Image: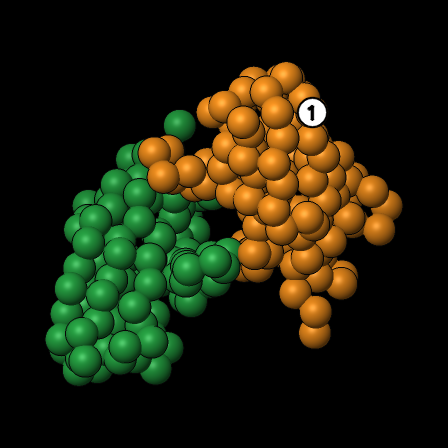
Chain colours: A green, B orange
């Protein structure tokens, strides 16, 4: 089955700096890669996703890049703000697996004011 | 619009008991999935229901089961509870495939 590894496990940045989180996946059939943000006491919230036919996607301060050859994808947050502090999860799912997501281990991001 | 609603929010059960958790998806969503979240194992897929049929299943023992009703509401049941079943159980819904919205979860503690 699919295996997703996520790095780093913790990330501390100064407000205004950029944050980058990287994930690698094992199943070459995976074609959908969402990113979730989880705040304390809440469920994960979808912040951006990318399909395998696209190399990059941006939404305001957030961007995701995908390299299917190397089987890795990354989340980039620019101009970080204190409210970006949370745990971020990457995930992957192979085509035909419905909504069966395999998640990475998570990255705890702390944005220091 | 209303989000995914999970009840109850917190639950304490004794080893050996069984428990039923409930999930009301976003109106119009036909896919409902369940995940277990623990500090040690992270987020793990339990099962997915789509139009009342189980579409996918994760690698959990048969003590974990679920179902979906005609109104898309879903329940999951865990029988013969073990201490290791203590976790946050998350429900997520989507209209078709992709684009999950998660609920806030049910925190289950087994003592």
Q: Is residue B35 visible?
A: no
Q: Residue A60 placed where, x, y %?
A: 34, 82
Label 1 marks which chain's residue? B
Above or below, A83 relative to B86: below
Location of residue A56 in the rendering, given as x and y in whole percent from the top left corner: 30, 67
Q: Which quadrant would the N terminus of chain A be assigned to in this image?
A: top left
Residue at the image point whose x is 19% and y is 54% from the top = A10
How dense is the environment of label 1, judged by Cα within 10 Å: few (below 14), some, or many (20 and up)? some
Visible in this render: residue B76? yes
Give whichever of B47, A9 is nearer the camera: A9
Front residue of A15/A54: it is A15
Position in image of residue A65 (x %, y %):
26, 62
Residue sitting at x 29%, y 35%? A26
Note whether A92 is above or below A37 in the view shown.
above
* Left or right of residue A23: residue B44: right
Residue B29 lies, with reference to residue B90, above or below; the image says: below
Please state if B62 lies on the left or on the right of A105 as rendered. right
Question: Residue A46 placed where, x, y %?
Answer: 46, 62
Determine which residue is flagged by label 1: B18
**Residue at 26% from the left image edge and 56% from the top image edge:** A108
Which quarter of the figure has residue A19? Answer: bottom left
The part of the image, by quadrant, that contains residue A62 is bottom left
Q: Quadrant of the C terminus of chain A?
A: bottom left
Classify B34 as above or below B7: above
At 69% from the left edge and 40% from the top edge, which residue is drawn?
Answer: B21
Query: Which residue, as the protein is rendered here, is positioned at the far right?
Result: B70
- The secondary structure type at the circle numbered 1 is loop
Give the camera-side residue of B85 and A10. Answer: B85
Q: How many marks?
A: 1
């Amino acid at each position: 089955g699919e295996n997703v590894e996520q790095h780093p496990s913790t990330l501390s940045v100064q407000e205004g700096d950029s944050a980058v989180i990287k994930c690698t996946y094992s199943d070459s059939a995976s074609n959908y890669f969402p990113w979730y943000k989880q705040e304390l006491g809440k469920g994960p919230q979808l912040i951006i996703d990318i399909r395998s036919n696209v190399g990059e996607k941006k939404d305001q301060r957030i961007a995701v890049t995908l390299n299917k050859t190397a089987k890795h994808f990354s989340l980039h947050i620019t101009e970080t703000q204190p409210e970006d502090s949370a745990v971020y999860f990457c995930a992957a799912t192979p085509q035909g697996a419905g909504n069966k997501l395999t998640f990475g281990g998570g990255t705890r991001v702390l944005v220091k004011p | 619009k209303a989000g995914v609603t999970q009840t109850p929010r917190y639950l304490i059960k004794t080893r050996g008991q069984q428990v039923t958790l409930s999930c009301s998806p976003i109106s119009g969503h036909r896919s409902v999935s369940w995940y277990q979240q623990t500090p040690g194992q992270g987020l793990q897929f339990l099962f997915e229901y789509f139009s009342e049929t189980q579409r996918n299943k994760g690698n959990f023992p048969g003590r974990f089961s679920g179902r979906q009703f005609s109104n898309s509401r879903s329940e999951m049941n865990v029988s013969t509870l073990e201490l290791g079943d203590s976790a946050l159980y998350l429900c997520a819904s989507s209209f078709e495939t992709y684009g999950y919205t998660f609920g806030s979860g049910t925190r289950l503690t087994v003592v």
